[in-house]
Amino acid sequence: MKDTFGRTIDYLRISVTDRCNLRCVYCMPREGVPFIPHGQMLTYEDIVSFTRFAVSRGIRKVRLTGGEPLVRKGIADLVRSLAVLPGIQDLGMTTNGLLLEEMAAPLKEAGLHRLNVSLDTLDPQRYERLTRGGSLKKVLQGIQAAKKAGFGTADAPLKLNCVKMPDTTQAQLDRLRDFARQEGLELRLIHLMDLEEGTFSKVEGGEGGHCAQCNRLRLTSTGILKPCLFNNLGYDIRQLGYEKALEAALKNKPLAGTHNTMDSFSYMGG
């Protein structure tokens, strides 16, 4: 599939839930945000059905996000259903890792190709502050479980996502780089973003944030297909139908992001 600027669009990010078991300072306020009623969320059948259609049109890479995808019941079943769709070449997931210790093996068995784990620091106290109560120990245990399950290889990559905060020091980054190197993992540095202000930049060690080469669409947990994270445009796949929603997203995908005053990272999945 091509958008109006000639970019090949072959990547679909799917937010399976807006719920999360953390309250990261860069994602949501301390008190959290109102959750979307379950009745408004896409069912797994909806997600598989739309993904099957999108793959028939040229989507080759799919990533599951949240919120936190592992808090949604039966997530391994969704992975299993997506993994067998003809045409999907890359099926990934981004997780905060808190539930990964028990879920890594089921996800690998279900057919997940790759994992990205959010890890902003290796200091337990700083991690607790940034996540407002998260356990660094649980995340590190989850990473080891993922490696044991078979992630962290050339065929099943395991990457670390670090959000670079204004007070992140070079020493903290060096410690993360050393950890990644010792564990045989890849580290991606994501500069702090602001949806309303339109503040974003290219991901260090990744492909995100480079508008001229953007190849992605985003499907929210409520069925809104968005052509750009930093844009208010969105098309309801249930109201418009799959084909019209996809055509509208391709036709109206902007050349570059500006700002998003309607959504949050917890809803969009980043």
Image: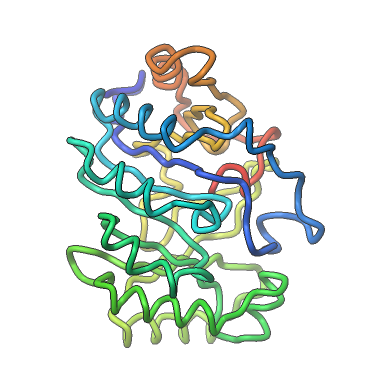
In percent of width and height, residue 209 lies at 45, 47
Residue 181 appears at what percent x and percent y?
32, 83
Q: Quadrant of the N terminus?
A: top left
Name the one closer to the observer, 44 or 193.
44
- The vertical placement of 25 against 178, above or below, is above
Position in image of residue 107 (x %, y %): 34, 60
Q: Quadrant of residue 243?
A: top left
Residue at image position (60%, 58%) is 192
Q: Is residue 59 above or below residue 62?
A: above
The way the protein has been coloured in the rendering is rainbow
Furthest residue in direction right, as rendered: 31
- Above or below residue 105? Residue 221 is above
Q: Position of residue 161 (x, y in %)?
A: 46, 65
Q: How many marks?
A: 0
Q: Residue at x 53, y 71 (%)?
A: 98
Front residue of 269 and 1: 269
Image-based side of 33 in relation to 226, left or right: right
Indicate left or right for 124 with 83 as reference: right
| Residue 82, picture quadrant | top left
- What residue is at 64 percent from the left and 43 percent from the top? 195
